[in-house]
Image (cartoon, grey):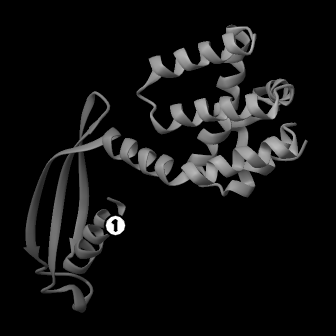
Amino acid sequence: MGLLSVGRDAGPEAGSGDVQHLNQLSAEQFSALTEVLFGFLTEPKEVERFLTQLSDFAAMNKISLGPLKNIVKSILLVPNGALKRNLSPEQVRADFVALGLSEEKASYFAEQWKLNAPTLTRLAVGQTLMINQLIDMEWKFGVTAGSSELEKVGSIFLQLKLVIKKGSQVENVYVGELTVLEKKQAVENMKSEL
């Protein structure tokens, strides 16, 4: 087995055996399970609906729910790792093939990845922005009065203090002195990420 693009998140111990079970599903069953998986990935807050759909899938296909949940947990490591590393559909396909999934099923999953990647990326960015929430900001402007570099004397600078909520903790983050140009670039970067 070669190296995976998703890294250690989905190593051989975290999916190879489970992928073998996916090869036993018919193309129709695999398609239905993939639809359930992407439904959960694109709407991660709908856990109850996801579990109900998994239960229905297991009952309809006469598969034990416990082992199916374990398979799904392992398989979800690949798209989650792919999202973190911004992998292409081809890299996702190659990872599933490396884990032992048939070429046909890996290609189908990669197609679904390609269709859903923009939504998944947007959700990941939204989660990241929510994790570190800006609560307050203080700034002070100043003019450099003295410096060992003649060019810096008389330049305008900005000192920032950000109050950020990280999970349940509030943290003060002090940003060093920024020139007006650096501040402008920082604001542009923030705008482009939103």
Q: Residue at x 68, y 39 (%)?
A: 78
Q: Amino acid at mark 1?
A: Ser
Residue 167 sits above or below residue 96 on the image: above
Q: Residue at x 57, y 47 (%)?
A: 83
Residue 5 visible here: no
The percent coordinates of residue 145 (x first, y second) are: 10, 80
Query: Residue sitting at 80 percent across and 24 percent down?
Result: 18
77 relative to 52, above or below: below
- Relative to 71, is 172 above or below? below
Q: Is residue 88 visible?
A: yes
User: Which residue carries the number 1 mark?
Assistant: 192
Q: Residue furthest right?
A: 1
Q: Residues within 10 Å of mark 1 (few under 14, many from 20)?
A: few
**Which of the 4 quarters of the picture holds residue 56?**
top right
Which sits in the foreground, 97 or 137? 97
* Residue 168 on image: x %, y %: 28, 27
Question: Is disc 1 placed on a helix, strand or loop?
Answer: helix
Which image quarter is the C terminus in? bottom left
- Judge left or right: residue 95 versus residue 78: right
Q: Along the line of sight, which residue is nearer the eye, 66 or 135?
A: 66
- Residue 68 point in image, percent of width and height: 70, 16
Residue in front for this viewpoint, 30 or 163: 30
In this rendered view, identify the residue nearer to me: 122 or 12: 122
